[in-house]
Amino acid sequence: MADDIGRALRDVVRGDVDFGIGARALHTMDASNYRRVPLGVVAPKDADDVRATLALCAERNVPVVGRGGGTSIAGQATGTGVVVDFTRYMNRVLDLDPAAGTAVVQPGLVLDRLQAAASPHGLRFGPDPSTHSRCTLGGMIGNNSCGSHSVAWGTTADSVAALSVVGADGAAYRLGQGWDGAPQGLRALVERELATIRTGFAPFAGLPRRISGYAVDALLPENGTDLARFFCGTEGTLGLVTEATVKLVGAPIAKALAVLGYPDESAAAEAAAGLLPYGPLTVEGMAADLVPADSGLPKGGAWLFVETGGATPGEARAAAEGIVRAADVVDALVVDDPAGQRRLWRIREDASGTATRMPDGSEAWPGWEDCAVPPARLGPYLREFRGLLREHGLRGTPYGHFGDGCIHVRIDFDLLTEAGIGRFRRFSEELAVLVAAHGGSLSGEHGDGQARAELLPTMYGSELVGLFERVKGVWDPADVLNPGMLVRPARLDENLRFAVLPREPVDVVFGYPHDGGDFSAAVRRCVGVAKCRTESAGSGGGVMCPSFRATGEEAHSTRGRARLLHEMLAGEVVTDGWRSEEVRDALDLCLSCKGCRSDCPVGVDMATYKAEFLHHHYEGRRRPMAHYAMGWLPRWLRLVERTRTAGIVNCLGGVRALAGLAKRVGGIAGEREIPRVARGTFSGAWHRGLGRRFAAARARGDGPEVVLWPDTFTDHLAPQVAQAATRVLEAAGLAVALPPTRTHGRTPAVRGRVCCGLTYVSTGQLDRARAVQRRTLDLMEPVLAGERPVVVLEPSCAAALRTDLPELLPDDPRARRLADRVVTFAEALERYAPQWTPPRIDRPVVGQTHCHQHAVLGDAADRRLRERVGLEGELSGGCCGLAGNFGFEKGHYEVSVACAEEALLPAVREAGDGTLVLADGFSCRTQVEQLAGVRARHLAEILADGLG
């Protein structure tokens, strides 16, 4: 049947129709606990495609579900029929009228893009969920989303003026105020049920976040018969939006943020409603469980984030300080600089991901993510909610929109066992009763979906829920649109996405220490928050996910790859396990930048998962030639050194025909230049006497000795970096030594040198990586017996030693000891030569923090060192795009260039005269040189020049 429907859709749809394994696997889940396998995916070009899709599916009784960013938490973006993905083509701002304060948008438009279009006019869209960088306007309309500014600007329903909608049979509707555009029979139904509607909704009159059910009361004559408002929150069960006219609000010229500290969350909840008369833009709450130790928040066990606006910075700050004076707090902080506010807001926004892990690392899940009660009832409700958790032996950390009485929480449900699922159901039923007793709504932001729709009678009663069913019948009598949601819903404990995963641990190579050694648990980390789908790296210096930003395709996002791995483990859609070509193709464009390891709120580490997959995928089989050419790079370079043929290699590489042949044989992109090999390595020169000359030239002092790691890239391709670093370290009073080597006679054996194994890891040759690492640990035993730090100049190698080494050799205690010794160049100077005064450089600088440094090592010491020497300017976020072997491999060149063009190359091109280009990674320097024709330099080189 699926093939027939796919062929029929291709005949009538101009957009993309994909019923393949990969597309189906990518769309089995949203950000909820639920999983449904679709027949296929349609990406419509326009409203005509949507009409054609719905008409054909209605004719064949095939379910249809609309999908935007896929961040829904209640399961409403999953379906068993055809998924209509609006993000690929129907994603534009069609018109923006500053005078009228309106915009006309398509449903696949990401909210941040609307905000960017409105901002130059001093306008913005009011609602702003924490997923604003990837959620779409269509999804916000479907769920009636709200966000942190709802105390000022309300819900999405408050911001929608008119909607163009396609019904279940392909018919078009234009919804606004009044009955014009309504489907036949809706007005008659409402007018027959006026008394039921008025009495049924009356108990919720004071509830600002009533999102559950259908907003049929918006159709009452005294409420203006607002069809557009009514349609918001219907979750794609009545029709699909193809165009929306939305209202914009005036954005404050200046903002300030007051962070108020309270003893605990109950105290913060009690205080929230009392702040509303001061006219804040936000009143957000969160407790210490979700806050990192170095957050910089004021003292307290829970906090309210209260934003104020004004015509001037002084006015905004005065409003914030007035709130601080009015609040009874433990401590408070007022921040008025935009960068400081963004940093604090990221703590709050990341809670949707960090809440998925309990403090002890155990998993927590949505399901009761966003109940809402009247704000004045929030304190008592939270206390009873905590009590109910204790009764069921569950844990969760509430946070969210305290000013609106809306609470988010992830709970450590056991959704893997029958007993745990039974407890999930019992808790859900009792919590629904508790919410209703406080006059609340089962959903205060994310909709009911499958997670709560079954319990709507507890909130509304059977008569009103029966009316919802009749309303659904008017719009969609065949129940084609998103069946199982809101009306006649599936049970809340059906279709759980964990049910298909293997119960026994999968045999893997990495240790996965943060997931109990269980690869399935590692893959389960991805809960669909989709921070990896952001369209720009942003001013915060983020990295994740460069390949998604380059392609715009779900398959090349961290979430998409995690979904495919999930389906690989499930074995239902992706049936060939580790041999899956769909998984391999999705992972092929993963740069292994490790950005997700730090930027993903739940710490997904796709670089590790990719290496694991490639290991199994090619086990016992011939690999791509690039894996031999670049994965074995340490071998080839040591062979060149041993045979003293660097000059010959460089000469041959300069002959176009020979270089082209070598690239074809080696699986290297034809557009790439092969880097030149140094005529002599740093370590070779060191053992031939350079080390003795450095020691002799060093002034006497009592500084400690450091071990300088001769990584493959620095040693063979950029030895001048190691020479510069040694000069600087010696000038700072540190004694420099190299790791021990295994000698051949009196000469150090080339094969007897240390190596982190990075190139083997990145190409998934994990058996070779472990063999190399074990040999390295054997060589390093004399160093590990003492306390000397190990200075690593190449960030990717330092990251491999800090993370890959102990995770590949978890049973060898030497691996952890070496990982703990690794320091960067800047960290070595800061920790072991704190009294040294570095030379003043006083030059502007551009460049990019290495991805692995951002994700694993951190760059705080580098920032402080740059400030001390007068290197002025912020380094770009994002990724250079070369990423070791990735940008050299055939088929990756265009994506590699697109990544570099996002931030790095524009910054280099726009740099003024006298600006230094800084890049500590060999890949970053190579990318800049090959694409911009500019020589970038390691920080050690810049400081060495400053020594004179």
Image (spheres, rainbow, N blue to C red):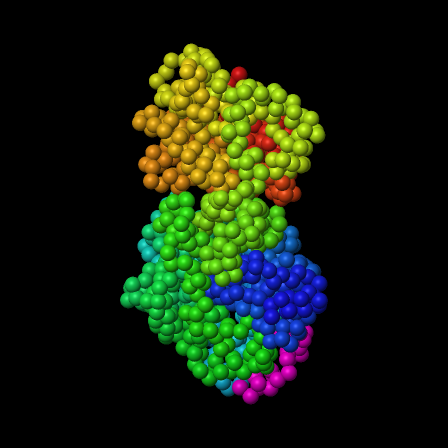
Residue at point 52%, 80% (across, down): 469
- Front residue of 778/807: it is 778
Residue at point 43%, 33% (across, down): 772
Q: Percent x, y for residue 626?
A: 58, 38
Q: Is residue 119 visible?
A: no
859 left or right, relative to 183: left
- Front residue of 83/136: it is 83
Q: Percent x, y for residue 585?
A: 57, 50
Where residue 110 sits, quadrant-wise, is bottom right
Residue at point 67%, 75% (across, down): 171
Q: Is residue 210 above or below residue 551?
A: below
- Front residue of 485/668: it is 668
**Quadrant assignment for the N terminus:** bottom right
Q: Is residue 46 magenta?
A: no
Q: Is residue 352 above or below residue 80?
A: above
Q: Percent x, y for residue 545?
A: 54, 47
Q: Is residue 177 magenta?
A: yes
Q: How many marks?
A: 0
Residue at point 35%, 50% (across, down): 516
Q: Percent x, y for residue 729?
A: 44, 22
Residue occupying the far bottom of the picture: 192
Give the residues drawn in magenta, as a range: 167-193
Where residue 677 sits, quadrant-wise, is top right
- Front residue of 786/539: it is 786
Q: Is residue 717 visible?
A: yes
